[in-house]
Image: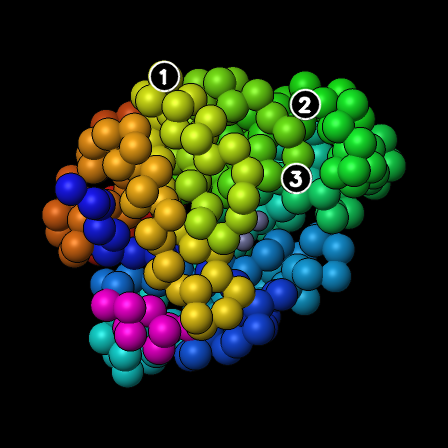
Amino acid sequence: MVMEFFADWHTHTSYSDGRATPEEMVAAAARRGLAEVAITDHGPRGMFIGVRDAETYLEIKKLAGKLGEKYGVRVLVGAEANVTGLDGGLDVPREITGELDILIAGLHPQVWCRPLRETLTWILPNQVGRYISRVRDSMRNANTTALVAAVHKNPLTFVSHPGLMMAVDLDEVARACAATGCAMEINTGHHYDRDGVVQAALRWGARLVVNSDAHFPETVGDLAAGAALLDKYSVPPELVLNAGKTASKAEVVPGDKQSRVFIPPARTRSNVRLI
Ligand SMILES: [Zn+2]
Ligand SMILES: [Zn+2]
């Protein structure tokens, strides 16, 4: 049976590089029949594509309640934070992520690092690696170190598109995710080794989540490619954070997350742990 999803937890709006307003994206989620949608704009240190500053997330948060009521969709606000250094640091501070519903970390080869010199020693070679496979492969260890550190260091809901544009060792990432309760994303908006992500998650017992990464209303909730992939590998719905037609069916609360939960449970109404 093809898996259904109650949520799309990865979308962008004109607050970062998306092409539509939060309202247009929420309206699109309602048209798709989703119970939940998350607005997760890019962190502020993304080159030319991030939010103006981290406080912008609080501005978006103020809109969420009203939009949710108007369209009958639960609207979550999160950040797709950039991993800004080999130490696994993010570009959204704890004071802000503590106010958000979802925290995503992703590797992107367009980011101003902290320390700044890593923009040259780490990010620039990854940019070159997009065109020269030998260079891309040579960065795999550094990228894996950074992403694994981010998983251990931050209370992430999931890592976005692991392996897209920046090569990583998916087994190492899956091991870190399994150990911390972080999920790995099957991102239907980009082509990368999504089969490899599913296989690594199954090997190590990491959870998965399927999202559109929509930058336009048209693709919000367009998760069919993810459903097909889960079907191909017979992934059980318990392993998928947003599986099911309604949030109440998603009984996926694990017992291994105490150290990573820093938002009181009352803030998360679905029984999937967010942050
Ligand atoms: Zn991304
Ligand atoms: Zn994204």
Specify whether 96 is left or right of 125.
Answer: left
Q: Quadrant of residue 179?
A: top left
Residue at x-position 20% and y-position 45%? 2
Q: Residue under label 1, please give it.
A: 203
Q: Residue under label 3, please give it.
A: 165
* Cα–Cα span, label 1 and label 2: 20 Å
Q: Write down the region rendered in magenta.
A: 25-33
Residue at x-position 57% and y-position 21%? 169
* Residue type, label 2: Arg
Instruction: Give the percent coordinates (x, y) of residue 113.
Output: 76, 42
The answer, for residue 5, to whether it is visible in the render is: yes
The answer, for residue 95, to whether it is visible in the render is: no
Instruction: Give the percent coordinates (x, y) of residue 117.
Output: 86, 36
* Residue type, label 3: Met
Disc 3 crowd, CA 10 A, few/some/many (<14, 14-19, 20+): some
Q: Verify CB contact (< 8 Å) between mark 2 and mark 3.
A: no
Q: Which color scheme does this rendered protein use? A: rainbow
Instruction: Give the percent coordinates (x, y) of residue 107.
Output: 62, 39
* Cα–Cα span, label 1 and label 3: 23 Å
